[in-house]
Image (tube, coloured by chain):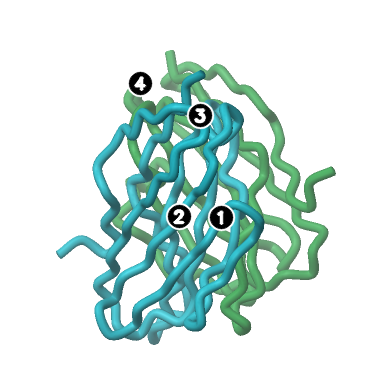
């Protein structure tokens, strides 16, 4: 099982649609979870952290299920500007310290 | 303005050249990372430094040599690279002990000719 696995893309949706991305991780010792957004030829930027209780930021909702080692991101009322690659990121602690492990990303394309 | 600065932004080098990529973070973090992102591929973790000590080296070829002189600076020394090493090289930093998110520099787009 890969360390961080994401839904294969691309997701092509019309404006106003609701879209959900899923992610699973293999290291049960993982402590921190994030969704990053990466625009074409740019660096990844933090979209939101993911908490056990779930968290919402405007149109974006992130959920974490530790028992299933599963993370999700829901985007409501999609905008053209939401078009990007969404990266699931897990911060795992081990004897060596910590490292951020990235999923391959899911590409979202929102059209008018 | 980003808290993580990388230079140069673009670099073209021949296979026999030696060059260095530089990363500087102004966020007071104690962990720094080098990632490689090739075209249409996911981010690959190359090196991790926690408290200036290298803690991870993901089987990166020896033609890539990292250096972390202090917690604010990170270098990636390059020598005798191959064309397949052409990629976007991203530096990131985080506060390791708190498991916080990482902040990325804008990257160096490297082309090996």
Distance CA(mark 4)–CA(mark 2): 39 Å
Left or right side of A49 for A74? left
- Residue B13 versus residue B35: which sits nearer the camera? B35
Which residue lies under the disc numbered 4?
B83
Residue, far top: B113
- Say if mark 1 contacts mark 3, CB within 8 Å: no
Q: Is residue B81 visible?
A: no
- Say if mark 2 contacts mark 3, CB within 8 Å: no
Secondary structure, mark 1, is: strand
Which residue lies under the disc numbered 3?
A15
Label 4 crowd bin: few (<14), some (14–19), many (20+), radius 10 Å: some
Left or right side of B9 for B54? left
At 29% from the left and 52% from the top, the residue drawn is A6
Which residue lies under the disc numbered 1?
A60
Question: Residue A68: which quarter of the image?
Answer: bottom left
Secondary structure, mark 2, is: strand
Query: Percent x, y for residue B110?
Result: 52, 25
The colour of chain B is green
Please, is residue B112 above or below residue A103 in the view? above
Residue, far left: A1
Label 2 crowd bin: few (<14), some (14–19), many (20+), radius 10 Å: some
Q: Nearer the viewer, mark 4 or mark 2?
A: 2
Distance CA(mark 2)–CA(mark 1): 6 Å
Residue A74, label in figure = 2
């Amino acid at each position: 099982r890969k360390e961080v696995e994401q839904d294969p893309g691309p997701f092509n949706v019309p404006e106003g649609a609701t879209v959900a991305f899923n992610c699973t991780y293999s290291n049960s010792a993982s402590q921190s979870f994030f969704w990053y957004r990466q625009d074409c030829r740019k660096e990844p930027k933090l979209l939101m952290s993911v908490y056990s209780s779930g968290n919402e930021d405007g149109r974006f909702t992130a959920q974490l299920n530790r028992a299933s080692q599963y993370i999700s991101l829901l985007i409501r009322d999609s905008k053209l500007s939401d078009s990007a690659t969404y990266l699931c990121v897990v911060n795992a602690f081990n004897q060596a310290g910590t490292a951020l492990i990235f999923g391959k990303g899911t590409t979202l394309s929102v059209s008018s | 303005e980003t808290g993580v600065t990388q230079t140069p932004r673009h670099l073209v080098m021949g296979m026999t050249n030696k060059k260095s990529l530089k990363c500087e973070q102004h966020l007071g973090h104690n962990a720094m990372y080098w990632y490689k992102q090739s075209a249409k591929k996911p981010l690959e973790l190359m090196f991790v430094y926690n408290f200036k000590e290298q803690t991870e080296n993901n089987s990166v070829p020896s033609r890539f040599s990292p250096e972390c002189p202090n917690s604010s600076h990170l270098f990636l020394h390059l020598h005798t690279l191959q064309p397949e090493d052409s990629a976007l090289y991203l530096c990131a930093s985080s506060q390791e002990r708190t498991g916080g998110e990482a902040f990325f520099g804008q990257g160096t787009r490297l082309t090996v000719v």
